[in-house]
Image (spheres, rainbow, N blue to C red):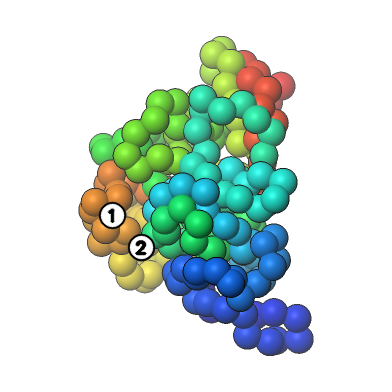
């Protein structure tokens, strides 16, 4: 959860874990920044969403789960709250998010970060929708890669080791199991620390993230 600042230090509606009914306190698409320098966009949710899942944001700032079955170009964000359709709320678009949900219960799809991984939307629809999937960056299978988003090497982010509840820390430098937040009804069991730099998908599948 982050506290938000507007222009000139003015407080924004929040914190980021809060949802809002209409009339919304912000214009859709409005940007706010936290005291840590992370950036968030105010959106309307077009489906049920859960903390830590990925969303695609359309041209009128409606956010829905990011799925590999949808190859439409879109901006990408990380949902900051549990929400239902027509709620308003914040999604993160820049900075470090330390608990992005995966769809894998063991190690999130990666035992360590000694090789390069590409980040893609989930391959099949599940619960929750919009989880992160990892593939080898040199994969020969065409993928709809998420650009502007990468795994954070946790050994270089020392402050994450003391973050309670939603920290994503393990001895292997990859994110580990986390059952404390979000609630288990909307959380498969593993998360990754991810850095976002205004991520997006193009809708074009390629066979190598470096192509």
Marks 2 & 1, CB-CB < 8 Å contact: yes
Q: Is residue 93 visible?
A: yes
* Residue 17 location, quadrant: bottom left
Q: Residue furthest top?
A: 140
Residue at position x 69%, y 60% in the image = 29
Where 89 falls versus 146 (above or below)? below
Residue at position x 45%, y 71% in the image = 18
Query: What quarter of the picture does the N terminus occupy?
Result: bottom left
Q: Secondary structure at mark 1?
A: loop
Query: What quarter of the picture does the C terminus occupy?
Result: top right
Q: Is residue 156 visible?
A: no
Q: CA distance from mark 2 to mark 1?
A: 7 Å
Residue at position x 54%, y 18% in the image = 139
Position of 177 with respect to 41 (left or right) is left
**Residue corresponding to mark 1:** 178
Position of 200 with respect to 186 (left or right) is right
Answer few, some or many: residues within 10 Å of disc 2's Cα (few below 14, many 20 plus, some between 14 and 19): some
Where 134 falls versus 170 (above or below)? above
Q: Secondary structure at mark 2?
A: loop
In the rendered image, residue 52, in percent from the top left (x then y), is placed at 43, 53
In the rendered image, residue 200, in percent from the top left (x then y), is placed at 66, 41
Residue at position x 39%, y 59% in the image = 82
Q: Which mark is residue 166?
A: 2
Q: Residue furthest right?
A: 8
Q: Observer-nearest residue: 209 or 33? A: 33
Answer few, some or many: residues within 10 Å of disc 1's Cα (few below 14, many 20 plus, some between 14 and 19): many
Q: Which mark is residue 39?
A: none
Q: Observer-nearest residue: 11 or 161? A: 11
In the rendered image, residue 3, in percent from the top left (x then y), is placed at 53, 78
In the rendered image, residue 30, in percent from the top left (x then y), is placed at 70, 66
Q: Residue furthest front?
A: 23
């Amino acid at each position: 959860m982050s506290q938000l600042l507007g222009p000139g230090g003015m407080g924004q509606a929040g914190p980021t874990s809060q949802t809002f009914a209409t009339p919304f306190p912000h214009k859709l698409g409005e940007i706010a920044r936290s005291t840590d320098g992370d950036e968030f966009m105010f959106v309307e949710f077009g489906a049920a969403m859960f903390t830590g899942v990925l969303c695609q944001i359309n041209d009128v700032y409606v956010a829905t789960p990011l799925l590999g079955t949808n190859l439409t170009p879109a901006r990408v964000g990380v949902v900051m709250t549990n929400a239902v359709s027509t709620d308003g709320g914040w999604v993160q678009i820049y900075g470090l998010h330390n608990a992005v949900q995966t769809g894998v219960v063991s190690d999130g799809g990666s035992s360590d970060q000694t090789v390069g991984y590409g980040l893609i939307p989930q391959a099949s629809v599940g619960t929750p929708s919009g989880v992160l999937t990892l593939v080898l960056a040199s994969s020969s299978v065409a993928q709809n890669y998420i650009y502007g988003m990468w795994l954070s090497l946790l050994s270089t982010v020392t402050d994450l080791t003391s973050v309670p509840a939603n920290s994503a820390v393990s001895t292997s430098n990859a994110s580990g199991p986390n059952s404390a937040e979000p609630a288990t009804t909307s959380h498969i069991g593993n998360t990754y620390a991810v850095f976002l730099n205004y991520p997006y998908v193009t809708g074009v599948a390629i066979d190598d993230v470096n192509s």
